Amino acid sequence: MLEELVQILANEREVGAYFRLTLLAPEIARRVQPGQFVHIRILPMRDALLRRPFSVFQAAGDNLSILYKVVGKGTAVLSRMQAGDQLGALGPLGHGFTVPKSSGEKPLLVAGGYGMAAMYLLAQRSPRPGVVFVGGRRRVDILCEQEFRALGWDVCATTEDGSYGHRGLVTEPLVTELRRDAKRKRLFACGPTPMLKAVARIADDFDVPAELSMDEHMCCGVGVCLTCVIPVKSADGWEYQRTCTEGPVFDSKEVLWEVPR
């Protein structure tokens, strides 16, 4: 983990409320692994005590990029920053995805909205292409499709309103794929918690391994504040683990979706 003052190289609107931020961050960029994240301090917000966590989308050489959506005051300020401005960055943080082996299972990636951002490095570093299932409410929520296709991956898009791709939930074509052939497949997922819970259930139904990047609010990002804990199975029954350090990626079989009473 490193703390680095990073420079904005580009901060451009991707589509709708989504932006792509490219940073000169040589120390962090060289060390980041698929599924890890950075904690960003927005320096113009002098009254903001907490950093914001963002999954690393791309990393090459001295540069890394993130995808973010304007949802509040912090990301609104971030969206107005320009090339040459500086940010504080802490990273790379967290436990990421297991990169597939050339002789291993075929990877199936499942993403909801900007959950796609956490998947790109995994797809890029996988020795064999697979299928990306991406879902969103509307066409504007389907991100990075061309980047994944350029890597040789098949992309299956779904929208809840039917404005693009298949109409419905992202898990529906995933089930169709596994019904066709579930042998030697491995799932990787990032997105809203209800989607992750559904992916875990599907993985269990078809007896395929799955890794989930859990979507939890984080304050410190380094395991101190304990605001991002989730219940997981343990030798003694269950325990809480921190998504910022033990996660954000967990084996789907370890996650408890409800705390036992």
Image (cartoon, rainbow, N blue to C red):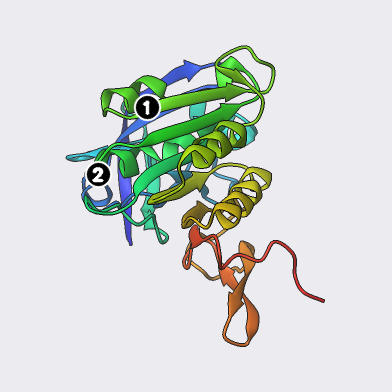
Report which residue position mark 1 lands on.
154
Q: Are marks 1 and 2 in contact (CB under 8 Å)?
A: no
Residue 106's place in the image compared with 66, above or below, is below
Q: Viewed as shown, does residue 9 lie left or right of 95?
A: left
Instruction: Find residue 34 and report its horizontal and vertical position in percent.
Output: 34, 49
Q: Residue furthest front?
A: 180
The answer to whether residue 228 of the structure is visible from this angle is: yes
Choose mark 1 or mark 2, whichever is in front. 1
Report which residue position mark 2 lands on.
125
Q: Residue furthest left?
A: 61
Instruction: Find residue 231 and report its horizontal and vertical position in percent.
Output: 65, 69
- Sequence-wise first label, 1 or 2: 2
Q: Could you say which is closer to the camera, residue 16 or residue 76?
A: 16
Q: Could you say which is closer to the camera, residue 23 or residue 105?
A: 105
The answer to which quarter of the image holds residue 77 is: top right
The answer to whether residue 66 of the structure is visible from this angle is: no
Residue at 34%, 57% in the rendered image: 98
Residue at 54%, 62% in the rendered image: 243
Q: Residue furthest right?
A: 261
Instruction: Find residue 9 and report its horizontal and vertical position in percent.
Output: 29, 27
- Secondary structure state at the residue bearing disc 1: strand
Instruction: Find residue 143 and report its horizontal and vertical position in percent.
Output: 47, 24
Q: Amino acid at mark 2?
A: Arg
Q: Amino acid at mark 1?
A: Asp
Q: Residue furthest top?
A: 163
